[in-house]
Image (cartoon, helix red, strand yellow):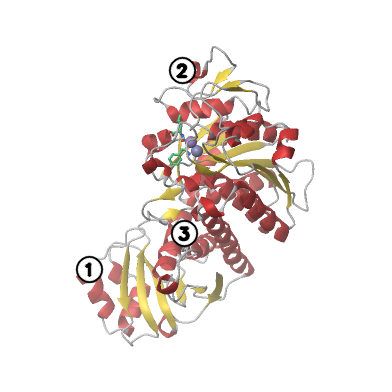
Amino acid sequence: MKISISTEALQSLSTDWLAVGVSGKKPQQDPNVQKLDRAMGGALSACIKEESFEAKPGKTLSVQGRGRLKAKHIVLIGLGDGPLTEARARLFGVKAGRAAMSSSSLCVVAPSSEAGLLAAIADGIATGAYRYTRYLTGARIPKKQLGRASIVLAKKPDEAAKLAVQQGVVVADAVNFARDLVNCPANDLSATQLANHAVERSRELGITCKVWDKPAIQKLGMPLLLAVNRGSKEEPRFVHMTYKPKSATAETPKVVFVGKGLTFDSGGLCIKPSTSMVDMKIDMAGAAATIAIVTAAARLELPVEVHGIIASTDNMTGGDAYRPGDVFPSRDGKTVEIINTDAEGRLVLADALAYARELKPSYLIDHATLTGACTVALGAYRAGLFSNDAALSDAYKLAAEATGEAVWAMPLDEDLKDELKSSIADLKHTGSRLGGAITAALFLREFVGECRWAHLDIAGPAFLDKAHGAMPKGATGFGVLTGLSFLRSIAASAAS
Ligand code: BES
Ligand code: MN
Ligand code: ZN
């Protein structure tokens, strides 16, 4: 998506869609609404009244221009009361992009010219217009897809405003890239193909990207990743992407992201019922978010060293599949007794986290569609945030809140630690059903050593049955916005 800035008057904008943000108790009294209403001979305020439109955040009202305006359609979008936040600016952009996704042109009247808000509006527009069309044919192929938009400002933009809009587009590209990977069905996205996407994206951006195939993974020492892979005909892949800023010094903070990259999770021998299996192509959403964060950090030239680590395989039921009761060593050295082969995510992550901690990161962050239990606890829209460091947890929560992504800090409850005691090995890898998201996180903690670590269980918000707020139906790209926002906050505090 290309987004430019315009300073034309509202009435004379020739466009398919004109999006206008509205705040306050009386939408009719909004100055932009009044301007357009005058040009339309009162038709706009009549519609507002008829539909009892209220300017609540994200509420929309679409009206035709009726030839009185150069715009074919107008969409009024509620901004809510109080100061415009980044999250509300983003939601505004998303609703504008969504309204216009099947047209050729969109003009969005910016409710603010502040750089941070312009960036959020821009990424909102470009993520709002997202659609996954790869497998549509014939009449199902959309005739039009929004490829460009402009943001309308009252006066000439300064350099900061122009840069902000372009940065918003970069962020949206990353989110949409993650969505494409997650929406892609498993028959077109094996671990090898996922790794190839990481390599391709990296090559374009001068990021180093190292990939280990199965023999190399054996040599590297990833017994738990290999255990999960045993039931599959597809080879596993381990990926390490590195973005080092040009200005890097010994003081430059280093953030390592780790992503669960299960290209399909059948459950293995502890096979899932078909209704739970149908969406399991999404089990690499953590990996997708990881690749997206690293590549966007590079494109934004953030002054932080950022690594992306992906452990990828599918979880299948082949003749050599790993079994309940099996015991495997791990990269860390601890032995693990397998209880339920459907708890495969924590196994591949255990080896990936052990590898990641060898990089001595300032912060270690993992994203994983790890447990159904987390969705039971928090619902579909909110991720569980677990951390062994209170300051990191607070910082990550703040970053998420700023973007509008919903997370909730969950406890690493020591009372549940006994659930992971095994009589035959160092650790059992699952506990009982109760507190399942917590025991999963406690298991991961065994492999992060002394690192400051945060774990995001994104099983709920990675993929939605229906659009919700700024998130679309299907893959959402959840975690990318927050990851980038966190990196920016790290960069800001390192600079001061
Ligand atoms: N990939 C699933 C978790 C999941 C569930 C992701 C729903 C997205 C939506 C994970 O590998 C899994 O199967 N977890 C089990 C763990 C259990 C066997 C301890 C679960 O949640 O049931
Ligand atoms: Mn599973
Ligand atoms: Zn899984």
Q: Amino acid at mark 2?
A: Asp
Q: Which residue is drawn at the image coordinates 52% and 29% (left, top)?
A: 441
Query: Quick check: which quadrant has ligand 1?
Result: top left
Q: CA distance from mark 3 to mark 1?
A: 24 Å
Q: Which residue is drawn at the image coordinates 41% and 75% (left, top)?
A: 18
Q: Quadrant of residue 326?
A: top right
Of the residues tagged 2 and 1, which is closer to the observer? Answer: 2
Tell me where residue 126 appears, x and y as whole percent.
Answer: 50, 65
According to the picture, the residue beneath numbered tag 3 turns out to be 90
Is 428 positioned to the left or the right of 473 in the image?
right
Q: Quick one: which residue is furthest to the bottom in this view?
A: 67
Q: How many marks?
A: 3
According to the picture, the residue beneath numbered tag 2 turns out to be 415
Q: Does label 1 point to a residue whose CB lies under 8 Å from ligand 1?
A: no
According to the picture, the residue beneath numbered tag 1 turns out to be 51
Residue 487 appearing in the image: yes
- The crowd level at tag 2 (other Cα within 10 Å; few <14, some 14-19, many 20+) is few
Q: Quick one: which residue is furthest to the left in this view?
A: 50
Q: Amino acid at mark 3?
A: Arg
Q: Earlier in the sequence, mark 2 or mark 1?
A: 1
Q: CA distance from mark 2 to mark 1?
A: 54 Å
Tell me where residue 402 appears, x and y as whole percent.
Answer: 49, 49
* Numbered disc 2: secondary structure: helix
Q: CA distance from mark 2 to mark 3?
A: 40 Å
* Numbered disc 1: secondary structure: loop
Tell me where residue 244 appears, x and y as whole percent.
Answer: 75, 49
Q: Quick one: which residue is furthest to the top in this view?
A: 423
